[in-house]
Amino acid sequence: METTTVKTYSITQVSKMYNLPTTTLRYYEDLGLLYDIPRLKGRRAYTQQHLNRLGAICCFKDTGMTLKKLQELFEAQDNDNDLTKTCEILDNHYERVLEQLAQLKKNERHIKRKVRFYHDIKSAKENHTEMPDWDDYRDRDF
C-alpha cells in the first residue's frame, strides 16, 4: 500500500509567496474566501488547492473586485445550481477590466509623451539647443 504525501505550506511560507501579511490570510479565512485549511501540530497547512484559490483571490482583487463581490463569486461557484450568477459576476468584472485596460493604455500614451518631452528638454539644456514645445508632442505617438 502506497501513501501519498501532500505538499503543504505554512502560513509564513504562503505569506512570503504571495507578498501578503499573515493577518490578511487569516482575514480571508474569517471571510470564508479560504476554508478547510487543515492543521498540522496546531499550525495551518495550506495545500496546492488553497494556493490556487489564493491565486484567484489575488487576481480578482488586483483587478478591482471587492472582497464582498469575491464572496458572492465563490458562493455562486460553489453552488453548481447558480452558474448564471457566476457567469454574470465574471462577465461584469471582465468588462470592468477591459475598461481599466483602455484607460491604462490612454495613460501610457500620455506618460510616454511626457517622458520623451522631458528627456528632450534635458537634452536641449545640455546641448544649448532650442527648447521643445509641448504642442509638438501632444498628439504624437512614440
Image: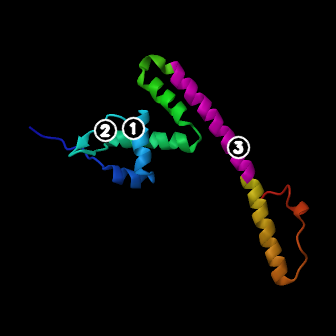
Q: Report the amino acid beneath label 2.
A: Ile
Q: Earlier in the sequence, mark 3 or mark 2?
A: 2
Q: Position of residue 14 (x, y in %)?
A: 37, 50
Q: Amino acid at mark 1?
A: Glu
Q: Residue 27 in the image: state x and y as whole percent.
A: 43, 41
Residues at badges 1 and 2 in contact (C-beta under 8 Å)? Answer: yes
Specify the amino acid type for callout 3.
Ala
Residue 95 appears in the picture as rendered: yes
SS label for mark 1:
helix
**In the rendering, which numbered label is found on residue 102?**
3
Alpha carbons under labels 3 and 1: distance apart: 34 Å
- Depth check, mark 3 against mark 2: the one in front is 2
Dividing the picture into quadrants, the one containing residue 50 is: top left
- In the rendering, at what x and y percent does residue 130 appear? 91, 76
Q: Residue at x 33, y 43 (%)?
A: 48
> Is residue 95 shown in magenta?
yes
Q: Quadrant of residue 36?
A: top left
Q: Is residue 124 left or right of residue 49?
A: right
Report the magenta residues as a range: 84-107
Along the viewing direction, whichever of 55 and 40 lies nearer the viewer: 40
In 3D space, how far apart are the residues under numbered discs 1 and 2 (Cα atoms)?
Answer: 9 Å
Earlier residue among tags 3 and 1: 1
Instruction: Tell me, yes or no, whether the highlighted magenta stretch contains residue 14.
Output: no
Outermost residue to the top = 81
In the picture of the structure, the residue carrying the numbered disc 2 is 37
